Amino acid sequence: ALAKAIREYAPQLIPGLLQTEAYAREVFRAYQPTAPEPVIDELVENRLARAALLRDPTTPLLWCVLDEAVLRRVGENKAVLADALRHVAALIRSHRIIVQVLPFSAGPHAAMEGSLKLMSFEDAPALAYVQGIGMGQLFDDPATVTHHTLAYDLLTASALSPRKSLAMIESVAEDYEHDQHA
């Protein structure tokens, strides 16, 4: 909440700050298939509460690079992913966030080992957060943060432009909507 900028690479799923309720519910159910419904409800509620920080029209800057796998990893109900992608597209169109898609055609890249989040602050050192299954690690060491920043910069250089990314996101969402109705 204190970050002035968040830059995130998402290799497998839509970042939490951008998730819809239905999408978050599917994600949490996949993580915890035997959890009681009240546990899932609480997780979803907390995730959506954190997304409230995007209600501020300018801060923080949120710049995400989504691997194409994020757009293609559809669950049982294609409408859930279509709606989630439309939500991301609406945030892009409102100029609230910047999103780039890293297409499969980009090939091997600097962040193939997992997700990455960089956070910069007005009055504090920058942080890097990397995440894997059931764990995450926060780095404040300047050399490590610089290393992860370079990886992110390389991702943005390999990704589609924001305009082409928006077109791809909307096209994929439309495809899922047509498949769902067919």
Image (cartoon, rainbow, N blue to C red):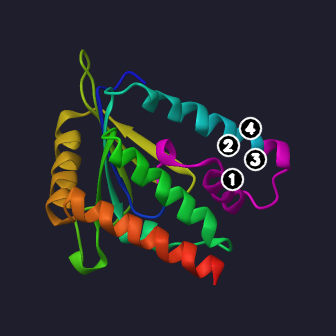
**3D distance between C-alphas at marks 3 and 2:** 6 Å
| Type of amino acid under label 3 | Ile
Residue under label 3: 40
Q: How dense is the environment of label 1, judged by Cα within 10 Å: few (below 14), some, or many (20 and up)?
A: many
Residue under label 1: 25
| Type of amino acid under label 4 | Glu
- In x, y percent, where is residue 134? 57, 52
**Discs 3/1, front:** 1
Q: Which of marks 3 and 1 is nearer the N terminus?
A: 1
Q: Do the residues labelled 4 and 2 touch (CB within 8 Å)?
A: yes
Secondary structure of residue under mark 4: helix
Secondary structure of residue under mark 2: helix
Residue 32 located within the stretch drawn in magenta: yes
Q: How dense is the environment of label 3, judged by Cα within 10 Å: few (below 14), some, or many (20 and up)?
A: many
Quadrant of the rendered image containing residue 60: top left
| Type of amino acid under label 2 | Val
Q: How dense is the environment of label 4, judged by Cα within 10 Å: few (below 14), some, or many (20 and up)?
A: few
Q: Do the residues labelled 3 and 4 touch (CB within 8 Å)?
A: yes
Q: Do the residues labelled 2 and 1 touch (CB within 8 Å)?
A: yes
Residue under label 4: 42
Secondary structure of residue under mark 3: helix
Q: Do the residues labelled 3 and 1 touch (CB within 8 Å)?
A: yes
Residue under label 2: 44
**Stretch in magenta:** 14-39
Front in this rendered view, residue 94 or 24? 94
